[in-house]
Image (cartoon, helix red, strand yellow):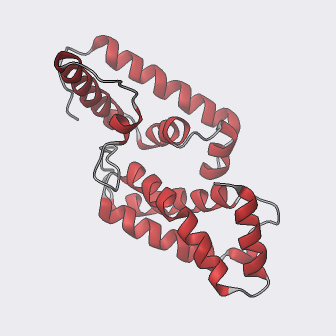
């Protein structure tokens, strides 16, 4: 999303245009919900986290730094809010990486040009295996992989969102990738279930 459009809406809201904040919410609603869903693995928790995120963004908007990236700021709020919800539940559900539209994020983002029946079956089996491996990762490692590979954020942006130092984000990413490689190398063939 173009940052310049966010900047215009931010300026308008600060100038007293109440509808401008609503426009900011609409611009970032899907990204926040999708992020919360991937992190929590539960649509109800993602709904709660999304609502709380935008309420907090509205409440703490005066603290938003001039020139900062609104998307990074609101995803940072979503990160903290979703983790708070998960802590309250005392169990961390495993992510299925399903998108809010009913599709599967991994399937939708994996390039596959007109496969044959055998290829299609193998592809779906690989996706099921990958989802199983991802579900076995600790939530913070899964979060870094989601933000990096699905949301295409830089390690620096992920650090801003998670309030972690850059080296921690890179280390968490490296450990997550190593864990996935290890699981894939040692696992038997067939779909993996968490």
In the displayed structure, would residue 58 be above or below residue 184? Answer: below
User: Can you give x and y, in whole percent of width and height, for residue 36 in the image?
Assistant: 44, 56
Q: Is residue 88 visible?
A: no
- Please give the name of the residue rendered at 54% of the width and 77% of the height, measured from the top-left corner: 55
Residue lying at the far front of the rendered structure: 114
Q: Is residue 118 left or right of residue 43?
A: left
| Quarter-of-image position of residue 129 | top left
Q: Is residue 31 visible?
A: yes
User: Can you give x and y, in whole percent of width and height, for residue 44 in the image?
Assistant: 31, 65
In the displayed structure, would residue 42 be above or below residue 57? Answer: above
Residue lying at the far right of the rendered structure: 66
Q: Nearer the viewer, residue 144 or 122?
A: 122
Q: Is residue 68 left or right of residue 131?
A: right
| Quarter-of-image position of residue 42 | bottom left
- Please give the name of the residue rendered at 54% of the width and 70% of the height, measured from the top-left corner: 26
User: Can you give x and y, in whole percent of width and height, for residue 130 in the image?
Assistant: 32, 28
Q: Is residue 40 left or right of residue 72?
A: left
In the displayed structure, would residue 123 be above or below residue 15? Answer: above
- Please give the name of the residue rendered at 60% of the width and 74% of the height, measured from the top-left corner: 23
User: Can you give x and y, in whole percent of width and height, for residue 58 in the image?
Assistant: 62, 78
- Please give the name of the residue rendered at 53% of the width and 60% of the height, measured from the top-left corner: 78
In the picture, which quadrant includes the N terminus?
bottom right
Q: Nearer the viewer, residue 153 or 168?
A: 153
Q: Looking at the image, how many numbered discs can be counted on the residues?
A: 0
In the picture, which quadrant includes the C terminus?
top left
């Amino acid at each position: 999303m173009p940052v310049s459009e966010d900047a215009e809406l931010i300026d308008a809201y600060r100038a007293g245009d109440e509808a401008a904040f609503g426009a900011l919410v609409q611009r970032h609603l899907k990204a926040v919900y999708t992020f919360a869903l991937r992190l929590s693995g539960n649509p109800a928790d993602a709904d709660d986290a999304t609502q709380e995120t935008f309420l907090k963004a509205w409440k703490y908007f005066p603290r938003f730094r001039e020139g900062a990236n609104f998307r990074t700021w609101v995803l940072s709020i979503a990160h903290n809010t979703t983790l708070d919800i998960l802590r309250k539940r005392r169990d961390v559900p495993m992510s299925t990486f399903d998108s809010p539209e009913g599709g599967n994020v991994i399937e939708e983002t994996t390039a596959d040009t007109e496969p044959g029946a055998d290829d299609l079956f193998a592809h779906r089996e690989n996706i099921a295996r990958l989802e199983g491996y991802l579900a076995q990762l600790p939530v913070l490692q899964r979060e870094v992989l989601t933000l990096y590979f699905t949301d295409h954020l830089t390690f620096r942006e992920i650090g801003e969102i998670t309030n972690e130092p850059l080296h921690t984000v890179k280390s968490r990413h490296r450990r997550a990738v190593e864990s996935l490689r290890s699981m894939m190398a040692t696992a038997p063939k067939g779909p993996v279930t968490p």
